[in-house]
Amino acid sequence: MYDVSRFGYASWKARGQSNHKKRDLELTRHISKLYDDVDGIYGSPKIHTLLKQEGEKVGKKRVARLMRENQLKARCSRLYKNNTHMDRFYASIGNKIHDLEATGPDQIWVGDVTYLKVNKEWRYLAMIMDKFSRKIIGWSLSAKRDVELSLTAFKRAATNRLLQPGLYFHSDRGSEYVAHKYRQWMKKKGIIQSMNRLASMNDNAEMESFFHHFKAERLHGNEYLTEKELRATIIEYVRFHNEKRIHSSLDYLTPVQYEVKMG
């Protein structure tokens, strides 16, 4: 049927697998372990970077081929962002960081609020990130989206980091960020507020990107019956993001590694 002689078949069987095939199997095992360690969120470019960091000498195309053949595809999902309260946002503070570049930690912080669900009820998550390293430095979760939610997240960041007058804080144009109580607290601490320009969501791209990855990599397809379960997931993901998730914008280092490297 296959036009193969008995001798030819016996010879092939005696030779066993080629060195190239054996190497593919070794690499596939290594790739699968790295892929599983990050819950399947990395594609071939980042898996290739991790392999290099662990001393594996392998080409990008080979990694991509092996991942494709073994159906190891980066897990990501289209996400819907609720814009119910967009009509309440208004501009009162300009974008002061548009032409600024952070050269070290605690120069520019960015923040945002997103919507999450617990047992079919909304919860609101406020996050604070250091723009220099993309490290999450403070967060707060509440059943209410108000000034206390955002201010609590900022105060927690302030206890974890070096808060000095002249720090820039950038956010979207949410009403909680222009509330009198929020602005007065910022002014008292010497913090310079900055906000997105009208219809310019990319002005806060780092926070938008974080929330997208958080929802796609942890929340999508999962249901949370209690706030305690959701909080545990947030704590785990923030630790993962800061200590294990490599970022192409940080030379494929984690936020913690990047801050150490840059002193």
Image: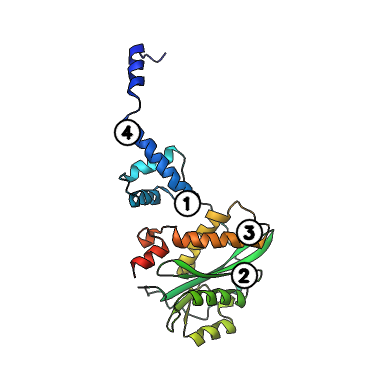
Looking at the rendered structure, the secondary structure element under dot 3 is: helix
- Earlier along the polypeptide chain: callout 3 or callout 4? 4
Taking 55 as reference, is 205 left or right? right
Residue of label 2: 85
Between the C-alphas of marks 4 and 2, the distance is: 57 Å
Q: Which percent across, then down, holds residue 33?
A: 44, 45
The mark lying in front, picked from 4 and 2, is 4
Please name the residue shown 38% across and 67% down the image. 259
Q: Is residue 1 left or right of residue 119?
A: left
Q: How far apart are marks 3 and 4 (CA)?
A: 46 Å
Going by the numbered disc 4, the residue's amino acid type is: His
Give the amino acid type for the residue marked by disc 1 in the picture.
Answer: Val
Residue 5 appears in view:
no
Residue at disc 1, secondary structure: loop
Q: Mark 2 or mark 1, which has the lower sequence index?
A: 1
Residue that badge 3 annotates: 229
- The amino acid on which the numbered mark 2 sits, given as a three-letter code, is His
Q: Name the residue under label 4.
A: 20
Q: Which mark is residue 38?
A: 1
